[in-house]
Image (cartoon, rainbow, N blue to C red):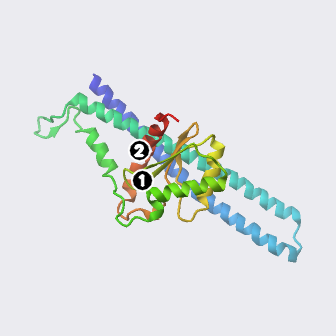
Amino acid sequence: MKKYGVFILGLAVLAALVVQLRTASNLRLELTAARAENESLRHKVAVDAVTGAAEGKSRASLNAKESNTEAVANRLQELESEVLRLRGVAARALRAEADVAQLQTRLNGRQPQSNTAGTEVGDSGFGSSSNLFLSYLGDAVAPPANIDPNYSKEGLTKAIARAAELAGVSLKKVQIENSEFPFLAGVVCESDAEFEKLKEQFKTMNSYQYSGATSRHGVYAFNITPYRAYPSDAGQRIGRRTLIRQQMFFDQLNSIPE
C-alpha cells in the first residue's frame, strides 16, 4: 500500500507540474502580446505628439492615449510578476517529483521483475520513474569551448557589480553557480525594492537578458545569459534544467550564513 501511495503521489505531482507549465506557457504568450501592444501604443503616442501640434489635435486626446499606455504597462508588469511566480512554482514541483522518484526507487529496489508476458517492469508496472525523470531533464550542458567572456563567471560578476553601481544598490553577497551552462547568478539584497532597481539595469544591458528569479526575503537566484548564447541543440534541455538548478542554487544561498 505504501508503494501505491507513493506512486499516486508522484502522479499528482506530475499532474500539478503539467498544469503549472501550461499556465506559465499561456502567460508567456499573453505577456508577449501585451509587450507588443505596449510598444505599438507607445509608438502611436510618439507619432501623435509630433503631428498633433501641426494638425491642432486636442491635448485631451493625447492624455487619453497616454492613460491607455499606462494601463497596458501596469498589465504588463502584473503578467511579468505572475510568470516569475509560476516559474518558482514549476521549479518546486519538479524538485518534489524528483524526491518522489527517489523514494519510489528505494521502495521498489533496483532489480526489475518479469511479468507474465515476459516483459521486465518495475514493481509498479511502469518501470523506474526516476529514470524517466532524468531522461526528461537530459544531460548537463557543458560551457562552450569558445564561451563569450560576458557569460563567464568573471563576466557575470562584473556585469552584476556594474548594474549595482548604476542602480545605487549595495549588495550583501554575489555568487556565481558555474556547474554547467548557462552559469547562474545569486545575490542577496536589503529588500525587493533594491533588486527591482538592479533588474532594471540588466534590461538596459545589450549583452544580457533577465529571465526571472527564484527569490524570497532578499535572496535571489537568476539567469541573465540570453537565449541566443545557448548551443543550438541544447535550448530545450537548458530550459528544463535551469528551473531545477535555479531552485537548488536559491536553497544553497538561503542556507549560507550572511
Q: Is residue 227 left or right of residue 137?
A: right
Q: Is residue 30 above or below residue 187?
A: below
Image coordinates for residue 99, horizontal then vertical, percent: 35, 34
- Where, by quadrant of the figure, is residue 41 drawn? bottom right
Q: In the rendered structure, which disc, 1 or 2, sits on the residue that comes first in sequence?
A: 1
Q: Residue 19: in sight, yes or no?
A: no
Quadrant where the N terminus sits is top left
The amino acid pointed to by label 2 is: Ile
The amino acid type found where label 1 is placed reads: Gly
Position in image of residue 197 (x %, y %): 65, 51
Determine crowd level at label 2: few under 14, some 14-19, many 20+ residues with C-alpha closer than 10 A. many
Decide which of 111, 172 is in the foreground and name it.
172
Closest to the observer, 8 or 63: 63
**What secondary structure is marked by label 1?**
helix
Residue 163 image offset from top left, x and y in percent: 60, 56
Q: How many marks?
A: 2
What residue did someone put label 1 on? Answer: 239
Indicate left or right for 179 with 46 as reference.
left
For the point 28% across and 44% down, the residue is 132
Check residue 244 in the rendering and tell me which mark sits there, or answer none: 2
- Spot the residue most to the top: 1
Say whether residue 52 is visible.
yes
